[in-house]
Amino acid sequence: MFGAPEERVDLALTVADGAVVSARLTSQRALAITGALAGRPVEDVLKRVPLLFPLCAQAQQAAALAAVEAGAGLSIAPDHHRARVALALAEALEGHARALWVEGAALWGGAPDVAAWAQLRRALASLTPALYPDGDAGRVGGGRLAPDEARIQLVLEEVRAALALEALPEQVVELAALTRWSEQRASAGAKMVATVLERGWADLAPSPRLCPELSAQDILRGLSSAQHYSDRPTLPEGPAEAGPLARASAHPLVADVIVHHGPGFLARLVARLVELTRWPDALAEALRAVAPAPAHTAPLPGEGEGVGLADTGRGRLAHRVAWADGKVTRWDRVAPTEWTHHPDGVATRAPVGWPAAEAEARARWHMALLDPCVPFGVTVEGA
């Protein structure tokens, strides 16, 4: 079995007469890896999903397991589902924190707080053994679920302490209050908001449309109707943006930002801050609902086909798995990065018309706020 290749996304801008005239995305995402899984034992592949798809590994594993369980006609214990949702949420929380403390710092000129992010990452990673002490979280149907409540509580306390400064105060429910909060520059998020406002970039890169919450049937319909749906998913109306802005656009603060500045730079940033504020409590609530459950032991049927979903920080992830005689016949993955970074989507459409003098700086913010989940580069040609 092979490991995951290095992945990245690059945005190339072309300028002429003092402005950006075109933008092109080049992706080195590991999209073809799913095709190479055909013929391999489905249970062997499942065990290696976190290695094959290390980005958002918890969500990748949850979606792959859900796909196989759906194809096998398994109804897993609700507590296993709750545990998977909690682990994927913890992973998304860590990703949002990294976007502020590590990638975000480079945007406003600060020093990346790698130590704080690494500490939070370690704390959240300890949730898996706190739920599945036998190391069988990736078992089809669920492993032995035995929550260690004391250990989980310690993790939650550490998470709340780490993110206390990033949490938006309760009174920040509209743009004016957000502006006053950002002026204090007391957190990484506040510094980013203040920088966007000071540079007059709040309304840059408005999203033409936001991706709705997709169902398994939506994914199956897309895969059946479009040849390149896995690497260029789109709605019937056109490309759509997934992620925090799509999920949080109805939140009062995000909605007020959209009213004043549209669904662009500031709205994307604030949507992430809103989620970072709400998710520690959501994680605690999800973990409280998890009760012990036995490991599933029934064998997997020789054939089946199903779609599984899991939510990541960047949007909804889907896996479709089909197998016969115990071996994979088809494995499709539809990741949120391919929604938001569609070659004809907001990533490439928005920069056209930007002044050449600010093109590279704007593009770096643009890509970071869209968050491709992998390293990205920006080049400006013809300057």
Image (cartoon, helix red, strand yellow):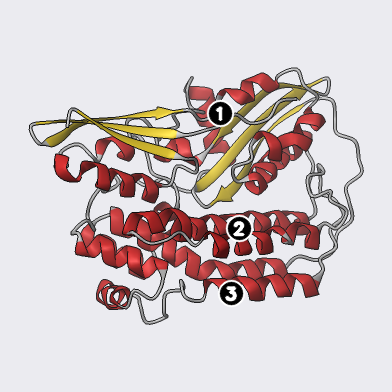
Give the percent coordinates (x, y) of residue 255. Answer: 32, 64
Which residue type does callout 1 highlight?
Answer: Ala
Q: Which residue is mark 1?
A: 30
On the picture, is 284 further left or further right than 181?
Answer: right
Going from N to C along the chain, the mark reached first, 2 or 1, is 1
Depth check: 40 or 106 in front?
A: 106
Which residue type does callout 3 highlight?
Answer: Arg
Q: Nearer the viewer, mark 2 or mark 1?
A: 1
Residue, x 39% and y 44% (percent of image)? 241
Where residue 147 sits, quadrant-wise, is bottom right
Element carrying mark 2: helix
On the picture, is 207 further left or further right than 312?
Answer: left
Q: Residues within 10 Å of mark 3 (few under 14, many from 20)?
A: some
Going from N to C along the chain, the mark reached first, 3 or 2, is 2
On the picture, is 177 further left or further right than 243?
Answer: left
Q: State the mark number for residue 160.
A: 3
Q: CA distance from mark 2 to mark 1?
A: 23 Å
Q: Residues within 10 Å of mark 1 (few under 14, many from 20)?
A: some
Which residue type does callout 2 highlight?
Answer: Leu
Q: State the mark number for residue 89.
A: 2
Residue, x 53% and y 54% (percent of image)? 95
Quadrant where the N terminus sits is: top right
**Which residue is at the far top?**
39
For residue 383, above or below residue 165: above
Q: CA distance from mark 3 to mark 2?
A: 14 Å
Where residue 27 sits, quadrant-wise, is top left
For residue 230, above or below residue 83: above
For residue 374, above or below residue 157: above
Going from N to C along the chain, the mark reached first, 1 or 3, is 1
